[in-house]
Each structure stands twice: as structure tokens, then as C-alpha cells.
Amino acid sequence: MLNVTGSGANETSGGIGVLPPSYYEFFLSEVAKARKPSPIRGLLPLEQTPGLISLLAGKPNAVLFPFTSLQFTAPDPNGSNGEVIHKIDDDMLSTALQYGPTSGIPHMVEWLMDFQEQEHGRKKKGEGWRVSVTAGSQDGIYKAVQALLNPGDAVLIEKPVYAGVIPMFETLGCEMIEVETDPDGLNSLSLHHILENWPSSRPKPKLLYTVPYGCNPTGATTTLARRHEVLDLLRKHDILILEDDPYYFLYFGTRPRIPSYFMLEAQTGDRNVGRVLRFDSFSKILSAGIRVGFVTGPTPILDAMDRHTATANLQPSSFSQAVIITLLRAWGRQGFLAHAHKVSKFYREKRDVFEAAMRRHLHGLAEWNTPEAGMFRLLLGEDGDSANIIRTKAFKNGVLALPGTVFLPNGAPTAYVRAAFSLLEEEQVDEALRRLSVVLLEERRSSGGLSSRG
Amino acid sequence: MNALDHSHHVSDFARRYAVSPLKGLQKYYGRDLISFAGGLPSPEYFPFTSISADILPADAFPLNAPRASSSSSSSFPLSWLWRLFGSGKDSTTHVGVPRSPRQGDGGLNLATALQYGPATGLARIQAFTREFTERIYAPVYNDWTTLVHTGNTDGWSRIARLLLNPGDTLLVEEWAYPSAISNTRPLEVRMKSIPMDGQGIRTDVLRAILSGWNAEKDGPRPRVLYTVPVGQNPVGVTMGLERKKAIYAICVEYDIIIAEDDPYFFLQVGEFVPKSQRKLESAGGDNDNDVAHFISSLVPSFLKVDTEGRVIRIDTFSKTIAPGVRLGWFTCSPLFAERLERIGETSTQSPCGLGQALVMALLEQWTFDGYIRWLRGLRTQYKLRRDYFVDCLADEFDLIPSPTTGDHDDKRAVLYAYARGTISSGSISRARALVGEKSQGRDGGRSGGSGRPLLSFIPPTSGMFVWVTVYFGDIPDKTDEEDGTVLTPERQFWARLADSGLLTAPGWFFSPEELLATSSSSSDRRIGHLRLSYTPSDMETIRRGVKIFAQTLEEFSRV
Ligand SMILES: Cc1ncc(COP(=O)(O)O)c(C=O)c1O
Ligand SMILES: Cc1ncc(COP(=O)(O)O)c(C=O)c1O
């Protein structure tokens, strides 16, 4: 196995080393290496040359687009109740309607680079990373997986894992190695155990997929100490990290925010950066239907992902991006964060309502930890099969939660269920948990199989 | 009659998709059920509280091309177009997406558009694509269905994953849309390209390839044909109904699935008529508002001959409304649609909800017939641009027509372009003898100056491109001083054009063999190709571009 840690890295000022492009040759999949840049898309930047006439691309003429103006309203994030009208300016309108660059419209990419620089303390220049806009995080993760894994490769995932990624690994024929999790998030001891006992005859996993804030479905946020340990282990074993962080902005805990892996890699250990591929999503704070997210990380990996995009769907929607960047520019970074703060406060209140209702109805019937982002996960007894309880009894009683089995690659039975509370009003929560308690009480009476610990 | 069972065509990859565990739960919704299951974000704090747009009226563009006047050819269409655009802007309508759901709104509201939605798209868009397909393409089997995607690139990419296994051979056109080819590259798929004539894929060759297939030597017989039948990208040719029938029959015989990538369907602008013979005419000769008449003026889709459900058609709004919204749809059998949906769920998921909602608001404002009217207006616009571009070429070169060779049903003329004043208009036969077929072009010798053609092309009857064949004669290959790559005359000429301020797409971009680097182009280096896209620029720019093109070519040929 290639190992260029330390010596191979290029030093920059400030003591940070940047892993060189050659480092990623080992990591890029055969498929990614086989992809060539799209010839026409590769030339599109030339069209910006002043005075150049282009008969290059099959772009429709902008005068033939039926939309002549576009506007939306949004509340002022800085407290006042007012709604503000945002008009998409004429330049941005033609950008919105036309084909655009594979990695995202330039204004958007620029804004996001600045944002990441400030939010995660990573220098835009000289640290070997950039940003690509994706059609949602799901799209970005899918392309990262395609860019990094070969059929049959082993990949480290959390147990339980966000169900949306299981088919990606499954269809690629990857072996999913489950790392244990607990209320402190990813269990570094479990990771340590897996890696230290890895058979020397087998190639090590190339990457770890993790959701560090409000993990879906456990709701756990990985602690700072854990993050340090995980990062150290991954460095030692030369493993990349896919940091899928859609709940980052929804952190509603009271303690100071825990730095992202993307931030930490520049601050700890040998400070060689380039192992973190970070996924941000606008789905939870601006709109899920708008299908825009962004990926931040080493340029060689993003280049490979862009090459995939260029042939798979050309680009994320220019239209969505134009709407979002118009809003972000008007709000600025502070406005955006103020909005995110409002949203997370809202979720915090929802969580408190939910938890209070659980104490009322489920005391002694179920166990849970209090999430600081994301959703609740409930344990309904020790070794029951929640899918059975939920799909039949709870459903009949008019309450539905998501059985934990869907978050396990092998679909094994589990006593966990995931409970999302974002959409419900207080009375509904109360009623639903009352119904659930009836089911659980009945269940316990008939089988005696559920633990009574609270 | 329903689609035949084509499940044996589903790739090993596509078979592995289980029903998405989360999406499968949707059937539980409804009645007095309180759900913690979905995990959707709360829309309460999505900051978009309204979205609206001004739109052109459906009849913003006239159906009649303006009368060719005796005034300078460069000035009339230009001024006319600008005037037209200005006037359209005056009479815009304001459309918006309602904020809250209402009974029967089919998801056309902000709350739905901003939230996660199923990969099948907004109900209203689903209904529209169905009605549109039914009325325009009239599929012949019963259980066809439609499914949204995020543009035809996404559509074809999903089709490739649906059907192709490693080691399969994909049938493609001799020249092909590069993204479509590159897309299949990581799938370890081979390409078999089929020569084209003025109507696209040659049936005689297609049949010969399949009947002579040697599975031992060449691997499994091809099961998939990828085609762009209208305004083919890059060649610009269009397949007539008879040709489609003949190809379909072969595909039935050899059990082949046809992927019909058809972004230029509504840009069918008709035969090119030289300026001197042009009359006041409407785009397709239809002046009444009869939808049926419009439809009958368009070459039908493969769906019209697909009795067995072996066609997967992809439509896009990219060329008819706006590419930035990334929206289109499949039409195919339910079996294929279900797998295509699964494949989409793990990657791009559904198209942008806001885009779907605004496009739908636009279509509802226009009504179905209004959209047809819009498409007819567009067609006139593209016809004008095509005519203008060819007129510009006619101003720079002497163009001499000659019938194409190829299938019997093709009567389209090839235009041979000579440097002005180098050939008498009576020398058609001589011109043919000099270039005629590719093999003869080899002996074409030096062009320019000596009465030999510089280039040839078939004026496109659809789409956005003119595909020119350039005759370079004896210009030798060069070697790039920096990286040692061999520069064919085509590459040299392309670079020369770029240096002169004109960006074009060189032929090798569209060669499946070159793109896959399976062969280092054994093709004839004395003949090169360029694809010229005449739609994005305004008229004045086009004229300047063609001038640069002509001058550079003449200089280049003179060496
Ligand atoms: C952990 C995780 N990753 C990714 C996603 C998908 O995000 P996006 O909407 O940006 O594709 C979700 C959505 O629920 C999620 O929970
Ligand atoms: C043949 C062909 N297919 C697909 C596309 C891309 O279409 P979309 O914007 O719908 O992805 C084009 C556009 O240039 C094309 O020419």
C-alpha cells in the first residue's frame, strides 16, 4: 500500500502540509481513472475570452427562453418580521436558464469557497481543496463513492448507517464493514479494533463514511475527543473520510460547536491535509426540493467527480443555484448563519416537546438518548424486532416510526426505531406517543420480551 | 396490447437495486396515522415564501418567417429579431407558484416544491408528460408510462446503467454526442458505430453487422442501440418514418432495445431552400392553430412504431424552455421505468422542485395548445437561424449541390463549397468526381485555388448544427512540440480557427473510436470535420464568424 504520509506532503506556510495529487492515484477507482474530461465542456471556459466568437456548444439562444424575470420573497433573517423581495438580476437570470459549468455557477462556487474558508478555518489558496456544487448531497456522495471505490472494495460505515447510502455500496458490490456507534458517536475503539486486526492479506478499506452531527438514524453527534481519535487512526492507516454533514447547521446543543473533520485535519497531528471529503446540504435549511448541496475536498477527487457529472447529468440545476446564490449574497454569511440558528432553535424546541412527551408516555418502555442534532432513536427492548412491532401493531394503532432494520446493510432485525419530530405539532406528538405506549404495553404483556428499563 | 417482457435486458447492476427502504414506506401514509417515519425537514423554515416569474406569451414568436427582401441579407433578419424580442417583453404575464397546497393542485405549490419529493416528480408534471406524450408521440402499446429525469444526459446515463453489462457492445451512430459515449466508458462497454447517410443510420449496414455477428470473437451480440434520430448531434440529419420502421424491424428481429435521445424533435425546420427561391412561408406550412396539423408535420417518434415496448424515449425541456432547469422525462415500459426510478433515487433523485413548479406554472398559464404554439414559434426561429447561417456560407463560398449517395430513400442534396470564383456553376459532375465518396477524397489532392471543393455539408433539416466535411488535400500531420501528440490537419485547422478568434467543435470530439481511444483514428486525414452550432450567437456575430471561417480555411488550404 502506498504510503506518502509526511514526507510526500508539500509544506505550505503556517505548518500545514498538503497531500500531493499523486497521493490520490491509489484512491481513485478504475472507473474514475477511465473517465476523460468532456471535450466540449472542457472548452467552454474559452468562450469567455473577449472577442472570441463561439460556434462550439449546442446552447439555445437566450432570447428564446420564455422567462423574462424571476423573483422570490424570503423573510429577513436578522430578526425583523419583514419579507424581502429578491429579484434575480438580468445576468443571473440568463445564467439561471442556460447551461452552466459542471462544478457549479462561478458566483456560487466563489461564495461557498469563502464560506468554507471562514467556517472551517481552511485557506482557499494553497491547501489543495475546492468546492463543487452537487444536485444534493445524495448526488455528491454517490459520485464520490463511484470515484473512489472499485467493485469488491471494503468500506467502513457506521452501524447503523444512513439508509440512503446502502444501495450505493451494494450495487457496487462493496463489502460494508460496520463500525460500532454509541451516544458519543462513532466508536473509535471499534474502529481501532477493526483496523488493528485487519488481515494483512486483504487491502485495507479506502474510506470511512460517517455522519458526524446528528447521525441519521441515531441522532448522535460525535464528540471532539472521538473525532481526534478517529482522525489519528485514519491517518495512521491512510484512509479517507467522507464527512456527510447535512445536520451541521442544525446543531442545537448548548455546548460550543464541535469542529468538523475538515477543520480538524488542518489543526491536529501532522497537519497534512487532504483526507477529508466534506458534504454540505441545503436540504434541511433552505429547501430539500431545490436539490442543491456542495462537496468540499481535495481537488483531484473533485475533478474525478466532476468528470462523472459531465457525462451523467452535465451539471446541477443552474436555476436552483441562481435562486440560492441570490439569497446568499443578499443575506451574506452572517444572515445565513442567523437563519440557520433560527432553524436549529426551532428544532430544539421540537425536540424538547418530543422528549417531554416521551417521558410522559414511554417511561420504562423505551430507551433513548437526547440528540443535539438530527432525530431520536428509541430502543424498544433488548432484542425485539421493532420492524414487526411497527409494521403491524403500531401501524394498526395509528402510529408509524421507522424500524431500525432499514439502517443495517444486511437488514437484520433490531429493537431500534427512528423517530423524526420535525413535522409534528405538540398534540400530535402527545397522541402518537400515547398510541405507541399502548402498543408497547400490550407487547410486553403478551411476550414479556421487552425490557422495562427506562 | 402491452409491452413485451424485456426483463432479460436489465443489467446485472440494475438488478441489484432493492426497492429503496425509505421510499417504500410512502404507501403507509394517509388516514389517521401519525408518522415519525419520514425524517423530512420542517418546511416551516424554508425561507422561500413566494416565487414568481414574468413569462413571454405563447405566441411571442410569429409563425411566418419574414419575406426575404432585396435589402442586404445581414440587416433584415437581425433587426427583425430584435424588434420581435422587444415586443415580446412588453406583453409578459406574471406567473407564480401558490404557497400552500390546495385540493387537486397536483403538488403545484411551494410547500411541495421545496420539500423532498418522490423520484417521480410533482404529480402535475407527471400528468403533463403523460398527456404530452400521448398527444404528440402517440405510443402504440397500452401500458407505456413516463418518468421525469434531470435532462437527457441524466436520462441516457440511467438507460446505460439499466441495460448494459461489462463486455456488451453498444450500437451507436458513426458520429455521436460525446457525453453519451463517455458515459458508457466506465461500464466497460464496447462501441460499434454504424455508418450514416442523409437520414442517419444505414439499415443495410446495421443488418449486415448483426447478421454477421461473431459472438466468439466479438462478445455478446449487441442488445442496445443509442440514436439521436432528429437533428442528429453532430451531423444534423433526421431519420424519416420509413427509416425508423426499417430500423425498428431489425431491432425486433435481433431483440434490440432502442434508446431514442430526441432533444431536437421540435426543431424540425424543413428542407433548406436557397435564398433566391425562398418565398413568404410559414415554418411547416401550417398557419392555422391546429395541433393535429402541427404534429403531422413532424417526423414521428420511434414510439409511433414501437409495438413491443422496446423503445426508451427521452425528452428534455432543455431546447424548448431552458436547459438550466434540468428537466425532462422518459417514456418506456413500466418494467424499465421502475428500474430507472430506482437508479435515479440513489443519485440525482428528483429534478429541482422549484424548477418543476415554475415550468408547470408556465405551461398551465399557456395551456397545452399554447405550448404547442410556443413550439411552433420556436421552430420558425430556428428555421430563420438555419437559413441565415447557410446564407452566410453561401455569401462566402460558391455552393454547388449534388445528390448524396446512400440509401435509396434519401434525396437530400450535399452542398459542395468552393472558394469564390474558382469553379463554374456547370461543373457539378466534375466536383463529384473529385470528391464523391470518402475513398475518392483521398486522391483529392490540394484544395483551394484549383477548382476543388474546400468543404461540403448537408443543410440540416432539424436541430442546431451544421456538420461540415473539410477537404484538406495533402496537408501533412504535424507533431505538437510540447507533448508530442500528432496533429492531424483537422486538429491543426481547428487550432488555427481558434487562434483567429473562432471556437468550433472538431470532428474527433464526436468519433466514438477516438473518444474511447480504441483506435488511433485510422480515418482519412485529408478529410476533417467540424460541427458549427449556429444558435447561441446573434446574427451579426454569426456573419463575422462565418467570414473568419472562410478566410481561415482559404489561407489554411493554400499552404
Ligand atoms: C445523513 C444524510 N445524508 C444525506 C442526505 C441527503 O441529503 P440531500 O438532500 O442533500 O441529498 C440525508 C437526508 O436525509 C441524510 O440524512
Ligand atoms: C443528443 C443530445 N442529448 C442530450 C443533450 C443534453 O440534453 P440535456 O440538457 O437534456 O441533458 C444534448 C444537448 O446538447 C444532445 O445534443
Image (cartoon, rainbow, N blue to C red):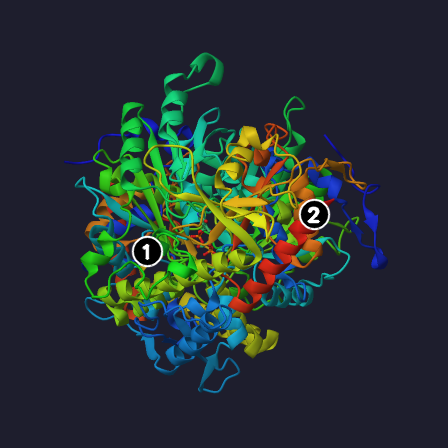
Which mark is drawn over residue A382? none
From mark 1 to mark 2, how far is it between C-alphas? 52 Å
Residue A261 spot, x, y in % from top left: 65, 54
Q: Is residue B296 left or right of residue A166?
A: left
Quarter of the figure with the C terminus of chain B:
top right
Residue A27 spot, x, y in % from top left: 66, 37
Q: Is residue A168 left or right of residue B313?
A: right
Mark before the other along the chain sequence, 1 or 2: 1
Location of residue A48 (image quadrant): bottom right
The type of residue carrying mark 1 is Gly
Chain ID of residue with mark 2? B
Residue that mark 1 sits on? B121
Task: Single out the mark in the foreground, 1 or 2.
Answer: 2
Q: Is residue A359 visible?
A: no
Nearer to me, A357 or B490: B490
Which mark is drawn over residue B556? 2
The image shows a total of numbered marks equal to: 2
Q: Is residue B525 left or right of residue A177?
A: right
Element on which disc 1 rests? loop
